[in-house]
Image (cartoon, rainbow, N blue to C red):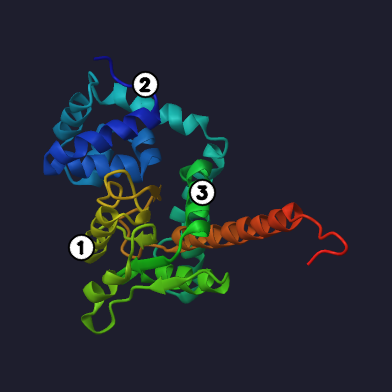
Amino acid sequence: MDPVTTYDDLKALMARAYPDMSKQLQRIARFAMEQPNELALGTVATVAEATQVQPSAMIRFANALGYGGFSEMQQVFRGHLLERSDSYRERIAQMRRKQVKGSGAPAGVLHELVGESVAELSHLEEKIQQADLKAAVKLMSAAPRIHVLAQRRAFPVAGYLAYALSQLELRTHLLDGTGGMLRESLRSIAPGDVLIVASFRNYSPEVIDAAVAAEKLGAIVIAITDGPVSPLKAPARVCFELADDSSKPFRSLVAPLCLAQALVVSTGHHLAEQGASKTVAKPARRKGTV
């Protein structure tokens, strides 16, 4: 079989092959999907150092995906980088951010975090498919009830969604597991309901189990997660895959919260359009009729 030649095909191939890879190759695969630009611009030695593997593992990784060597596989990542219109601006921004050398002063920390957040948001629109946004909005608008679940770092995403969707007068239930009652709360999910889950590596087992159980029950799962190897992808009807750099000690929620806000605002527009169309379609009452 000939090796794949597009980034999207390669990403899908890595996701399929991931479960059968060794721990070292899985580490490289996560790096490749989370930081494709770094792989495109790096050398075998620098990427091996970043993923904490031997350089020979990089060759084995490329071979496992059908390529003759690392350079052949790297060309796919470089082609993806060159296709992006903002590639040079992004590289300059990365260089400027790296010039800020670990100052512990609040202003320095803020400057670094703002730069990283801007870069993260610049990737968001590229990662999200319009078809997925439209599908999620339609599902949420038509759902008898919406349940929202996230834990640990991702919990603010669930909290915002539960609050904002309830402001649209949608029946929304935040599954927060207060008092260890998460399992009991899951019993309120019925077939046809929508369950929105958010989790990033290292994934919350309770969130994964809830998504799998809800899908088997007949509920519709919408997932906000970090990539094609996420365990939330399988049970999800719609899965938003955000790049989430797990190598950072403090990972940002800027992109997930921006996506959550886009879902809420888009759902509001959809509901308003539905209401307007119903008003237009309603026949005028004739005189003398009740």
Front residue of this view, candidates 184 and 127:
184
Give x and y (percent) for residue 267: 57, 58
Q: Specify the label residue 5 is tagged with.
A: 2
Badge 2 density bin: few <14, some 14–19, many ≥20, Cα 10 Å? some
Q: Quadrant of the C terminus?
A: bottom right
Q: Which of 190 and 178 lies nearest the eye of the viewer?
A: 190
Q: Is residue 127 above or below residue 257?
A: above
Whether residue 23 is situated above or below residue 57 in the rendered picture: below
Locate residue 275: give its quadrant.
bottom right
Instruction: From the top left corner, tell me how far across and down residue 116 is, in percent.
Output: 47, 57
Between discs 3 and 2, the one toward the N terminus: 2
Question: To which residue does mark 1 refer?
Answer: 205
Is 287 on the left or on the right of 61, as rendered?
right
Element under label 2? Answer: loop
Which quadrant is the N terminus positioned in? top left
Residue 203 figure quarter:
bottom left
Measure how far apart labels 3 and 2 are at the Cα level: 27 Å
- 3 or 2: mark nearer the eye: 3
